[in-house]
Amino acid sequence: MKVVVLHTELAGYTIACLRALGRAGHAVVVVHWPVAGEAPFNFDDQRPFSLVQRGHFSASWLADQQADLVLMSGWVDRGYVQAVRAMRRTGHSRCVICLDNHWTGSTRQRLGALWFKLSLRQHLDGAWVPGAPQQRFAKRLGFDQSAVKEGYYSADVAKFLGAARTGDGAQKRLIYIGRYVPSKGLYSLWDAFEVFSQKHPSWTLHCFGTGSSWAERRQHPQIVHHGFVQPEKFREHLAGATGFVMPSLSEPWGVALHEMAAAGLPLIASDAVGAAEKFIAQGENGWVFPAGDPDEIQSCLERLSEVAGNPAHWQSMAATSVELASKLTPEKWAETAVSFV
């Protein structure tokens, strides 16, 4: 089977999924935007699929591919949309749109859904979404339940599997991974951790990432800013870590939560993180708190500190995280892609 993927910005976890699809014996061609400056991932040359720069893409190029399946990342790229329309008028490729939006009912979303139903829905055979929050959005766009599948985002589970389980959580190291931008809720996290650290001076918060707010990063003796780190180098930072926190104010999914669950960490995430519904079992391997509330973050940190003092309890939470993370892998992602055809 031949698959053409019309993507925006590639990331390491996307590459892992595409690699699994190629290794399953399918011919895979990926069109992509330039790599984002805030997440400059490196991609190796040993991959079972082809990469095409967005500047080399055109409607005629897509028609010439004669793909069995076209996966289109949203509808933000008008060139992709126009090419899919043109292809469906003359070809027989199955076309699937991949979405990560939550339905909020805003005026902009309602107008967008109306445009979608009138202009694009008839050219698409299905929708692929990360989880339940996006399923509701897909239905608003006119897709029947039978045309919508979950599991669009998957972490590179094998890369992170059990990375944190070499210890017992006693090192008291809290991990944050994400961009340094206001929507990630870092200021709430830093505020909460400063208060928490007064009672728990042996704890440290290790932040990984970069972005527009880097210059305003909180300076504190127990907060360590590492900048951007390539995913393949993360294992050395995770060994002995105690927990992971994702305090986002807005986060359609959040693959990092899946990655840290695979690593075997107890998890703390805001209720704005879409992935929390799949990878956090409240009280069993972590806690979900109301987004933007430093007091609630602090409360979750206190619970984590209690768990860190009980190695057996910490190991139980770590095992639950690994179990939940292992339900979705790049190999299962590839199987879902093929199932659309």
Image (cartoon, grey):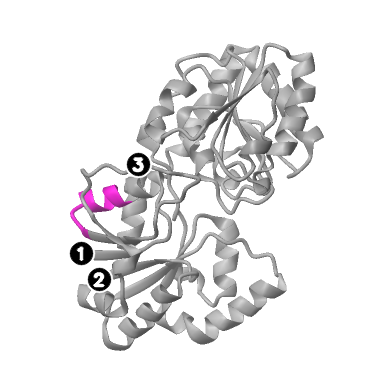
226 left or right, relative to 159: right
Q: Which of the 4 image quarters holds residue 163?
A: top left
188 relative to 116, above or below: above
Type of amino acid under label 1: Met
- Between the C-alphas of marks 2 and 3, the distance is 29 Å
Residue at coordinates 33% horizontally, 45% vertically from top-left? 16
Type of amino acid under label 2: Asp
Q: Earlier in the sequence, mark 2 or mark 1?
A: 1
Residue at coordinates 41% horizontally, 31% vertically from top-left? 160
In this rendering, the label closer to the viewer, 2 or 3: 3
127 relative to 93, above or below: above
Q: Earlier in the sequence, mark 2 or mark 3?
A: 3
Residue 118 on image: x %, y %? 53, 87
In this rendering, the label closer to the viewer, 3 or 1: 3
Q: Which mark is residue 42?
A: 3
Type of amino acid under label 3: Asn
Magenta residues (range): 18-27
- Between the C-alphas of marks 3 and 1, the distance is 28 Å
Residue placed most toward the observer, 264 or 195: 195
Which residue is tagged 2? 68
Residue 97 on image: x %, y %? 43, 69
Based on the picture, tell me whether residue 19 belongs to the magenta stretch: yes
The N terminus, quarter of image:
bottom left
Residue 333 on image: x %, y %? 36, 52
Q: Which of the 4 image quarters holds residue 4?
A: bottom left
